[in-house]
Image (cartoon, rainbow, N blue to C red):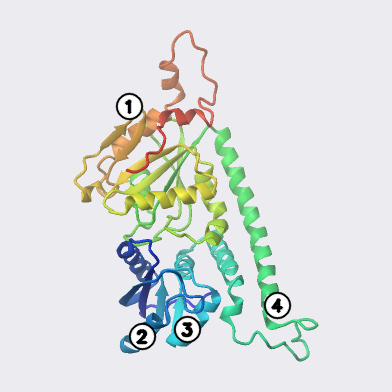
Amino acid sequence: MFDRPASGTRALLVRIDFGEGETGSRLNELKELAVSSGATVLGVISGRRAKPDPAFFAGRGKVDEIAEQCRLTEADLVFFDHSLTGVQQRNLEQALECRVLDRVGLILDIFAQRARSAEGKLQVELAQLKHLSTRLVGGWTHLERQKGGIGLRGGPGETQLEVDRRLITQRIKRLNAQLAKLTRTRQTQSRTRARAQVRTVALVGYTNAGKSTLFNQLTRAQLYAADQLFATLDTTLRRLPIAGAQKMVLSDTVGFIRDLPHDLVVAFRATLSEAAEADLILHVIDASNPQRDEQIDAVNQVLAEIGAGGRPQLRILNKIDRTGLAPGIERDGYGKIRTVRLSALTGEGCADLRAALAEIFPSSAEFAANLSPNLPEPEAQSFQEDDSAQFFSAPPESC
């Protein structure tokens, strides 16, 4: 769909500060994204502006500076840590005489590389097509011509732009239809688990927070886990046996990131439905990251966007082996579980998480044993959807 950066691509990174601050942390994240895409980072160019330039996004002087660095370093790709319009991207490529990719395009490219399942590939293609459909004007140079010749006509007076849009629209409709079938399949599986009284626990978190490592630690699975952004893309479910607890299924899915493309969130709605319909969300947080509060906000924003903002949530402070924090369970003033501190890499604190889950979702026998003799016996489904929320305090503003 997009021209993927080849392995060894030489890239420059550009970040313009419009008064938001945090330029350093954003640049570090952009470097990780570039490396994850397979590019070699040659240098970083930053600057400040009051507002984006309509034609080049950066000012003309900054564009000249970037062009000079492209010539000196022989870079063949420039990554902008911003969303560019089609016109801005076209003008920049002409001025810099090399390819230009914005943050959205870079994230979509990484997703395209990491998608393994048929569902994941469909969702990535849908997001790419939606992104491309808004950029046709800036991405083509032959749009003023009409097709001609026998069998090549796009229709009476139909321009190449109109043909491209029509083809993209048709493909988007087909992809939406295929994903709708997959969504119905997931809904059927979810209803089956509910009838079998199986609790669903979903791992969510900022990308590279350690979700897949924790998933492997809890389920003894062998998911690919690496110290890189978006190492895991496709959703995986495994049984989570815990003594004294109800039957559970644990799901691991794609990590979130700041400014996650909206089209990507919409396209992956079927995959992210595991989190939206979960009985409990385990929000995995990188305790060693100085920007963890901003990452928490970014994750909660995406959860709200997919309709999971009101789901019961338990925070997992991961990577305590890098911070010196002790493993354990944090409770609020009412004794409700608030946070579990652990290291998914070393296994420290994982027993505390299992104990917390057993306390939150006790087996029917243990739950009945704790009831007063004057109370009626619990029904087969011990807790209703809203009942599980009583074990949690409201998510704190920051860790």
Picture coordinates of residue 396 (x, y %)? 37, 39
Q: Residues within 10 Å of mark 1 (few under 14, many from 20)?
A: few
CA separation in Å, label 3 and label 1? 57 Å
* Secondary structure category for the residue under label 2: helix
Picture coordinates of residue 322 (x, y %)? 22, 51
Specify the farthest residue to the left: 324
Q: Earlier in the sequence, mark 3 or mark 1?
A: 3
In the image, residue 293 above or below residue 133? above
Quarter of the image containing the C terminus? top left
Residue receiving disc 4: 162
* Secondary structure category for the residue under label 3: helix
Give the amino acid at mark 1: Gly
User: For the image shown, how many numbered marks are present on the structure?
Assistant: 4
Give the amino acid at mark 4: Glu
Marks 4 & 1, CB-CB < 8 Å contact: no
Q: Which mark is residue 70?
A: 2
Give the amino acid at mark 2: Cys
Picture coordinates of residue 200 (x, y %)? 48, 39
